[in-house]
Image (cartoon, rainbow, N blue to C red):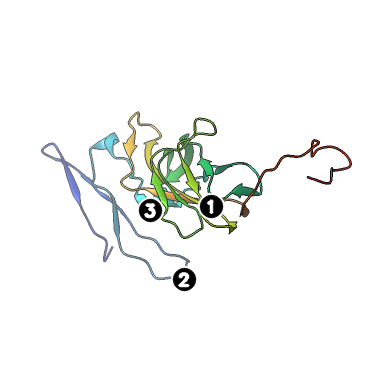
Amino acid sequence: MDGTPFGTAECGEDSVVLAMWRRQRATPASPWGEWEQVDRGGCGADILPVLTAEDFRRLPIPAPVLNVQPAADWVLVNMETIVYTDPSPVTLTTDLLGYQVTVEATPTRYTYDFGDGSKPLVTTDPGSPYPAFDTFHVYRALGTRTITLTTEWSGRYQVAGSPAWRDVDGTAQTTTTSAPFDVVERTSKLVAELCTAVPTPDDC
């Protein structure tokens, strides 16, 4: 066909297997895009499709849960606000050139934007809850804030019929944002009775 690229792989003296190419279009009426090589060719049963970085990024990787402590609608100014997430890998399946493909996505880097204009925290540590926490932020001003977590994922995949796992040449990202919360200031004072009493004591 005119415009179709060709490529070959040598498999002995006389055996030659064509490489795989593809091109795509957004709708049936749209023009075809450029040809893209998805496989370098191979020998017989060794020919398998390649999961590209673009294929990987199109998968519905679920964003990990963003945990914030204290788990309330407010945090204290000048005190640690703790963040952490789940580093568990995610397994998905997809179809690629007629093959079923199992994909394992693993979170590798986390970027926290704390919504106060400070420099984002970039780390490979998913963090831990109180009291063994090591990923946190200290707000220096009062106000309403949200925290946004961007997670970078690496991937590997296995094509049905092959025992081999292959690495994805590229990464994907997911983003999740916390519910809004207030950064507040609290003071303490001595009272004569418990403030949980009913009715509430006058000095509370």
Q: Residue at x 51, y 39 (%)?
A: 85
Q: Residues within 10 Å of mark 3 (few under 14, many from 20)?
A: few
Can you tell which mark lies on residue 54?
A: 3
Q: Nearer the viewer, mark 1 or mark 2?
A: 1
Is residue 160 visible in this depiction of the protein?
A: yes
Q: Residue furthest toward the left?
A: 13
Q: Are marks 2 and 3 in contact (CB under 8 Å)?
A: no
Q: Quadrant of residue 6?
A: bottom left
| Distance CA(mark 3)–CA(mark 1) | 28 Å
Q: Amino acid at mark 1?
A: Ile
User: Of helix, strand and loop, which one carries label 3?
Assistant: helix
Q: Nearer the viewer, mark 2 or mark 3?
A: 3
Mark 1 lies on residue? 147
Residue 29's disc number: 2
Q: Nearer the viewer, residue 149 or 161?
A: 149
Amino acid bearing label 3: Glu
